[in-house]
Image (spheres, rainbow, N blue to C red):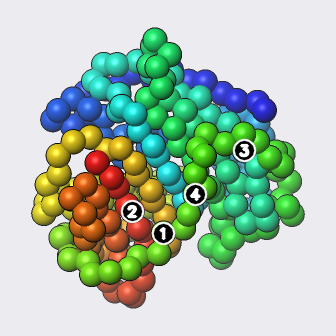
Amino acid sequence: MQHREDRFTVKTFDCRPDGQIKPHALMQYLQEAAARHAEQLGFGFADLDAQDCFWVLANLRLDVTRLPRWNECFTLKTWPSGHTRVVASREFVGADERGNELFRAGSEWMVLDKHKSRPRNLTRLKLALPASGPKALTTELRRLQPTGDYTRCHKLRVPPSALDFNRHVNNTEYLRWAFDAIGFGHPHTGPVRRLEATYLAELFEGDDIEILVRRPSERALHVLERRISEPADAFAMEVAF
Protein backbone atom coordinates (compact mmCIF):
# COMPACT_ATOMS: atom_id res chain seq x y z
CA MET A 1 0.00 0.00 0.00
CA GLN A 2 1.46 3.35 -1.06
CA HIS A 3 1.68 5.72 1.88
CA ARG A 4 2.96 9.24 2.42
CA GLU A 5 4.94 10.70 5.31
CA ASP A 6 5.02 14.41 6.15
CA ARG A 7 6.96 16.16 8.89
CA PHE A 8 5.26 18.98 10.76
CA THR A 9 6.33 21.37 13.52
CA VAL A 10 3.64 22.57 15.94
CA LYS A 11 3.32 26.35 15.65
CA THR A 12 2.61 28.80 18.46
CA PHE A 13 -0.80 29.76 17.05
CA ASP A 14 -1.87 26.10 16.98
CA CYS A 15 -1.47 25.61 20.74
CA ARG A 16 -3.76 25.75 23.75
CA PRO A 17 -2.65 27.65 26.88
CA ASP A 18 -1.05 24.46 28.23
CA GLY A 19 1.15 24.15 25.13
CA GLN A 20 -0.61 21.15 23.60
CA ILE A 21 -1.87 21.34 20.04
CA LYS A 22 -5.55 22.24 19.70
CA PRO A 23 -7.65 19.33 18.40
CA HIS A 24 -8.92 21.29 15.41
CA ALA A 25 -5.35 22.34 14.55
CA LEU A 26 -4.24 18.71 14.59
CA MET A 27 -7.13 18.00 12.24
CA GLN A 28 -5.77 20.67 9.90
CA TYR A 29 -2.46 18.79 9.70
CA LEU A 30 -4.32 15.55 8.97
CA GLN A 31 -6.34 17.27 6.26
CA GLU A 32 -3.22 18.77 4.69
CA ALA A 33 -1.44 15.41 4.60
CA ALA A 34 -4.52 13.73 3.12
CA ALA A 35 -4.89 16.44 0.45
CA ARG A 36 -1.23 16.24 -0.57
CA HIS A 37 -1.40 12.46 -0.85
CA ALA A 38 -4.67 12.47 -2.80
CA GLU A 39 -3.14 14.88 -5.33
CA GLN A 40 -0.08 12.66 -5.59
CA LEU A 41 -2.20 9.55 -6.24
CA GLY A 42 -4.54 11.13 -8.78
CA PHE A 43 -7.74 11.68 -6.82
CA GLY A 44 -7.15 15.09 -5.30
CA PHE A 45 -8.97 18.43 -5.53
CA ALA A 46 -8.12 19.08 -9.17
CA ASP A 47 -9.03 15.54 -10.26
CA LEU A 48 -12.46 15.73 -8.62
CA ASP A 49 -13.07 19.30 -9.73
CA ALA A 50 -12.68 18.13 -13.33
CA GLN A 51 -15.57 15.73 -12.65
CA ASP A 52 -17.72 18.41 -10.94
CA CYS A 53 -17.41 16.98 -7.44
CA PHE A 54 -15.37 17.26 -4.24
CA TRP A 55 -14.39 15.31 -1.11
CA VAL A 56 -16.16 15.76 2.24
CA LEU A 57 -15.31 14.13 5.55
CA ALA A 58 -18.06 11.84 6.84
CA ASN A 59 -16.62 10.08 9.90
CA LEU A 60 -13.48 10.26 12.01
CA ARG A 61 -12.03 8.48 15.01
CA LEU A 62 -8.83 9.67 16.69
CA ASP A 63 -7.14 7.62 19.44
CA VAL A 64 -4.48 9.60 21.30
CA THR A 65 -1.47 8.40 23.26
CA ARG A 66 -0.13 11.94 23.59
CA LEU A 67 -0.85 15.18 21.77
CA PRO A 68 2.20 16.95 20.29
CA ARG A 69 3.23 20.22 21.92
CA TRP A 70 4.50 23.64 20.88
CA ASN A 71 7.63 23.54 18.71
CA GLU A 72 7.60 19.75 18.64
CA CYS A 73 8.33 18.03 15.33
CA PHE A 74 6.28 14.96 14.47
CA THR A 75 5.87 12.65 11.51
CA LEU A 76 2.43 12.01 10.04
CA LYS A 77 1.97 8.88 7.96
CA THR A 78 -1.19 8.47 5.89
CA TRP A 79 -2.59 6.05 3.32
CA PRO A 80 -5.92 5.18 1.64
CA SER A 81 -7.38 1.90 2.88
CA GLY A 82 -10.22 0.93 0.56
CA HIS A 83 -13.64 2.09 -0.54
CA THR A 84 -17.26 1.10 -1.05
CA ARG A 85 -19.76 2.59 -3.44
CA VAL A 86 -20.36 5.47 -1.01
CA VAL A 87 -17.26 6.06 1.15
CA ALA A 88 -13.48 5.91 0.84
CA SER A 89 -11.30 5.25 3.89
CA ARG A 90 -8.03 6.89 4.90
CA GLU A 91 -5.71 6.13 7.83
CA PHE A 92 -3.26 8.24 9.84
CA VAL A 93 -0.48 7.52 12.34
CA GLY A 94 1.52 10.22 14.12
CA ALA A 95 4.91 9.67 15.80
CA ASP A 96 7.45 11.87 17.58
CA GLU A 97 11.08 12.28 16.50
CA ARG A 98 12.10 9.19 18.47
CA GLY A 99 9.50 7.08 16.70
CA ASN A 100 7.14 6.90 19.67
CA GLU A 101 3.52 6.77 18.59
CA LEU A 102 1.46 9.87 19.37
CA PHE A 103 -1.92 9.05 17.85
CA ARG A 104 -3.82 6.91 15.35
CA ALA A 105 -6.84 7.89 13.30
CA GLY A 106 -9.26 6.39 10.81
CA SER A 107 -11.51 8.41 8.53
CA GLU A 108 -14.24 7.96 5.95
CA TRP A 109 -14.85 10.38 3.09
CA MET A 110 -17.65 10.90 0.59
CA VAL A 111 -17.65 12.62 -2.79
CA LEU A 112 -20.43 15.17 -3.35
CA ASP A 113 -21.71 16.53 -6.63
CA LYS A 114 -20.62 20.17 -6.93
CA HIS A 115 -24.03 21.37 -8.17
CA LYS A 116 -26.48 19.10 -6.31
CA SER A 117 -24.50 18.41 -3.09
CA ARG A 118 -25.50 14.75 -3.39
CA PRO A 119 -23.17 11.76 -2.90
CA ARG A 120 -21.57 10.37 -6.05
CA ASN A 121 -21.03 6.67 -6.70
CA LEU A 122 -17.28 6.17 -6.26
CA THR A 123 -17.24 3.19 -8.61
CA ARG A 124 -18.49 5.37 -11.46
CA LEU A 125 -15.88 8.08 -11.09
CA LYS A 126 -12.49 8.07 -12.79
CA LEU A 127 -10.46 7.71 -9.59
CA ALA A 128 -7.61 5.29 -8.91
CA LEU A 129 -8.88 4.40 -5.43
CA PRO A 130 -7.44 1.22 -3.87
CA ALA A 131 -9.94 -1.56 -3.21
CA SER A 132 -8.58 -2.29 0.27
CA GLY A 133 -5.72 -1.64 2.67
CA PRO A 134 -4.56 -2.01 6.28
CA LYS A 135 -6.38 -0.11 9.01
CA ALA A 136 -4.75 2.09 11.65
CA LEU A 137 -7.41 1.20 14.24
CA THR A 138 -8.77 -2.14 15.40
CA THR A 139 -12.14 -0.53 16.12
CA GLU A 140 -14.52 0.08 13.23
CA LEU A 141 -15.69 3.63 12.65
CA ARG A 142 -19.31 4.32 13.52
CA ARG A 143 -21.80 6.93 12.46
CA LEU A 144 -22.84 8.77 15.62
CA GLN A 145 -26.56 9.06 16.32
CA PRO A 146 -27.23 11.90 18.81
CA THR A 147 -29.47 10.75 21.68
CA GLY A 148 -30.24 11.96 25.20
CA ASP A 149 -30.73 15.40 26.70
CA TYR A 150 -28.39 18.14 25.50
CA THR A 151 -27.98 21.66 26.91
CA ARG A 152 -27.38 24.60 24.60
CA CYS A 153 -24.02 26.20 25.38
CA HIS A 154 -23.42 28.53 22.48
CA LYS A 155 -24.76 29.84 19.21
CA LEU A 156 -23.11 31.58 16.28
CA ARG A 157 -23.52 32.74 12.71
CA VAL A 158 -21.14 31.08 10.25
CA PRO A 159 -18.51 33.69 9.24
CA PRO A 160 -16.85 33.90 5.80
CA SER A 161 -13.53 32.85 7.35
CA ALA A 162 -14.92 29.37 8.04
CA LEU A 163 -15.34 28.52 4.35
CA ASP A 164 -12.95 26.42 2.26
CA PHE A 165 -12.32 25.85 -1.47
CA ASN A 166 -15.75 24.26 -1.82
CA ARG A 167 -17.51 27.33 -0.33
CA HIS A 168 -18.89 25.40 2.62
CA VAL A 169 -17.66 25.21 6.22
CA ASN A 170 -14.37 23.31 6.47
CA ASN A 171 -14.54 20.16 8.59
CA THR A 172 -11.97 21.51 11.07
CA GLU A 173 -14.23 24.46 11.96
CA TYR A 174 -16.95 22.14 13.29
CA LEU A 175 -14.34 20.75 15.67
CA ARG A 176 -13.14 24.23 16.70
CA TRP A 177 -16.70 25.28 17.59
CA ALA A 178 -17.33 22.05 19.49
CA PHE A 179 -14.34 22.56 21.78
CA ASP A 180 -15.21 26.24 22.22
CA ALA A 181 -18.66 25.21 23.46
CA ILE A 182 -17.09 22.69 25.84
CA GLY A 183 -14.83 25.42 27.19
CA PHE A 184 -17.74 27.82 27.78
CA GLY A 185 -19.77 25.56 30.04
CA HIS A 186 -18.16 22.19 30.60
CA PRO A 187 -14.61 22.47 31.93
CA HIS A 188 -12.66 19.23 31.85
CA THR A 189 -9.37 17.97 33.18
CA GLY A 190 -6.79 15.85 31.46
CA PRO A 191 -5.85 15.48 27.80
CA VAL A 192 -8.06 14.19 25.01
CA ARG A 193 -7.74 10.38 24.75
CA ARG A 194 -10.37 9.58 22.14
CA LEU A 195 -12.40 11.65 19.71
CA GLU A 196 -15.15 10.49 17.36
CA ALA A 197 -16.91 12.79 14.92
CA THR A 198 -19.72 12.42 12.39
CA TYR A 199 -20.54 15.06 9.78
CA LEU A 200 -24.29 15.10 9.15
CA ALA A 201 -24.88 18.14 6.91
CA GLU A 202 -23.05 20.93 5.13
CA LEU A 203 -23.03 24.42 6.65
CA PHE A 204 -22.64 27.65 4.71
CA GLU A 205 -21.83 31.32 5.30
CA GLY A 206 -24.59 33.05 7.25
CA ASP A 207 -26.12 29.88 8.71
CA ASP A 208 -27.21 30.33 12.32
CA ILE A 209 -26.25 27.33 14.42
CA GLU A 210 -26.58 26.27 18.03
CA ILE A 211 -24.10 24.06 19.85
CA LEU A 212 -25.41 21.69 22.48
CA VAL A 213 -23.45 19.58 24.97
CA ARG A 214 -24.22 16.72 27.32
CA ARG A 215 -21.98 14.93 29.80
CA PRO A 216 -22.73 11.18 30.00
CA SER A 217 -19.88 10.66 32.49
CA GLU A 218 -17.19 12.59 34.31
CA ARG A 219 -14.60 11.75 31.65
CA ALA A 220 -16.70 12.09 28.50
CA LEU A 221 -18.65 14.78 26.63
CA HIS A 222 -21.00 14.67 23.64
CA VAL A 223 -21.49 17.68 21.37
CA LEU A 224 -24.20 18.37 18.80
CA GLU A 225 -24.18 21.23 16.28
CA ARG A 226 -27.54 22.08 14.74
CA ARG A 227 -28.74 24.56 12.13
CA ILE A 228 -31.40 26.85 13.67
CA SER A 229 -33.16 28.47 10.69
CA GLU A 230 -34.03 25.18 9.01
CA PRO A 231 -33.61 22.76 11.92
CA ALA A 232 -31.15 20.01 11.02
CA ASP A 233 -28.32 18.28 12.86
CA ALA A 234 -24.99 19.12 11.21
CA PHE A 235 -22.29 17.55 13.40
CA ALA A 236 -21.97 15.12 16.29
CA MET A 237 -18.88 14.50 18.41
CA GLU A 238 -17.98 12.31 21.37
CA VAL A 239 -14.76 12.97 23.26
CA ALA A 240 -13.17 11.08 26.14
CA PHE A 241 -10.52 12.50 28.48
Residue 46's spot in the image, x, y percent? 70, 46
Q: Is residue 134 above or below residue 222?
A: above
Dots 2 and 1: beta carbons under 8 Å? yes
Q: CA distance from mark 3 to mark 2?
A: 23 Å
Q: CA distance from mark 4 to mark 1?
A: 9 Å
Residue 241's spot in the image, x, y percent? 28, 48
Q: Amino acid at mark 3?
A: Ser
Q: CA distance from mark 4 to mark 2?
A: 13 Å
116 relative position to 209: left or right: right
**Would you name the residue on which mark 3 appears?**
81
Q: CA distance from mark 3 to mark 4?
A: 13 Å
Q: Nearer the viewer, mark 4 or mark 2?
A: 4
35 relative position to 13: left or right: right
Q: Amino acid at mark 1?
A: Leu
Q: Amino acid at mark 2?
A: Met
Q: Nearer the viewer, mark 3 or mark 4?
A: 4
Label 3, residues with CA under 10 Å away: few <14, some 14-19, many ≥20? many
**Would you name the residue on which mark 1 appears?**
144
**Would you name the residue on which mark 4 appears?**
141
Task: State which tag comes first along the sequence, 4 or 2.
Answer: 4
| Closer-to-camera residue (171/108) | 108
**Residue lying at 32% horizontally and 80% vertically, measured from the top left:** 148
Label 1, residues with CA under 10 Å away: few <14, some 14-19, many ≥20? some
Label 4, residues with CA under 10 Å away: few <14, some 14-19, many ≥20? some
In what element is the residue under mark 2? strand
**Would you name the residue on which mark 2 appears?**
237
Residue 176's spot in the image, x, y percent? 31, 53
Q: Quadrant of the N terminus?
A: top right
Task: State which tag comes first along the sequence, 3 or 2.
Answer: 3
